[in-house]
Amino acid sequence: MFTQENEILLFQYGKDNYQKAIDAACETFELDKDEDELVTATTQNSCYNCLFRRWTRESFMCMKKSANEI
Amino acid sequence: MERFKIFICIDDTDEIGYHTSTGEICEAIREHIMEHYAVSAAPITRHQLFLHEDIPYTSHNSSMCFTTFLSEKEREKVTHFTLEHVENISAPSSDPGVCIAFEHEIRDLDTLIRYGFDAKEKVLTKESAYAMAKKQNLFLRELKNTGQGIIGAVAGIALRAQGSDGRIKGKFRLDTPSIDVQTLLKNDLIDEIQLIDGSFLSDNAVIITKDELKIVYLNHKCVLLVEQEGDYYRPLGKEKLTNY
């Protein structure tokens, strides 16, 4: 689900693959507390809605898990 | 006591995993003003800025802005409150910036607006933000750490002043599964209902309102965007509003 570039874990399916973002949600998922930053439904955990994702132009970085956990 | 339209914008107040968002801090400032100055305030807009590896944003690089009406004296008090509040409640490692400006004191709105759009597609510097603030007569203050948020704070005012950028903070739900356009427009939170191409619906067109409604800011108005679904219209969901 993620590629590693230097120390950065980058989601490899971009910003529009909602199913993959659900599949990628892990046990450390935490819903972003800011409702305005939620970009998809909250009925299932999705990395797109996670408090620990950091958006990039093409996708997002996971800021929670270390590379060896992915 | 004469009051003038004023823009208030903040940016970069959080850190990864922080409990209080920039939007919540902005809302607290807005509510403080309404409560203490007996004045209404327009809804908060969220403005998406450039996502680039050279910009040290926390997670999404957006700023929050709203407008209200204040006198000169009230502006001083509100500025003091805003700075103190942002300083106290922002995340320890955040880089907050605050920008405040009376609309009538902005010297060259077109140039300011261009700066706002630059911030959506270029990496800008703090120096450029200070230069723009000085040129346009904006109050600008960095509060903690690098103070990088001043760039987004200036850009947020520029984009809000332009009038067609961003989403309205918050969402709301109606207690009815569907409603006609004419009735929905009586809701204070919605100025217009449009299709994505900018066309309007007839007054008796029916909108499905089972889901939460998100509003965008277009032509200085709070607009509900909808798409046709058979004989009805459905508000655009979060996934389709990410570009706003």
Image (cartoon, coloured by chain):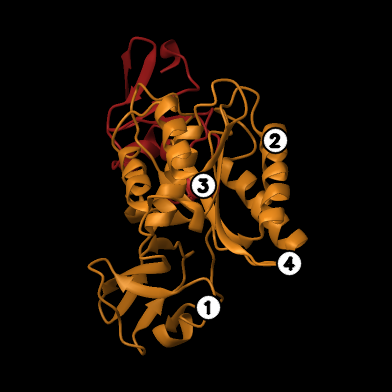
Chain colours: A red, B orange
Numbered disc 4: secondary structure: loop
Residue type at numbered disc 1: Asn
Numbered disc 1: secondary structure: loop
Residue A38 place in picture, x, y as percent: 47, 46
Q: Chain of mark 3?
A: B
Q: Residues within 10 Å of mark 1 (few under 14, many from 20)?
A: few
B121 to the left or right of B26: left
Residue A38 seen by the camera: no
Q: Between A54 and B93, which is closer to the camera in this rendering? A: B93
Discs 4 and 2 share one subunit: yes
Structural distance between the alpha carbons of marks 4 and 2: 24 Å
> Splitting the image into 4 quarters, where does residue A47 fall?
top left
Q: Nearer the viewer, mark 3 or mark 1?
A: 3
Structural distance between the alpha carbons of marks 1 and 2: 33 Å
> Splitting the image into 4 quarters, where does residue B125 fall?
top left
Name the residue rendered at 65%, 24% in the picture: B92
For marks 1 and 2 on the same chain, the one whose residue lies earlier in the sequence: 2
For marks 4 and 3 on the same chain, the one whose residue lies earlier in the sequence: 4
Judging by the rendered image, the residue that carries numbered circle 2 is B89
Judging by the rendered image, the residue that carries numbered circle 1 is B187
Residue B167 place in picture, x, y as percent: 43, 55
Q: Nearer the viewer, mark 1 or mark 2?
A: 2
Image marks 2 and 3: residues in contact by CB distance under 8 Å = no
Judging by the rendered image, the residue that carries numbered circle 3 is B64
Numbered disc 3: secondary structure: strand
Q: Residues within 10 Å of mark 2 (few under 14, many from 20)?
A: some
Judging by the rendered image, the residue that carries numbered circle 4 is B38
Q: Quadrant of the N terminus of chain B?
A: bottom right
For marks 4 and 2 on the same chain, the one whose residue lies earlier in the sequence: 4
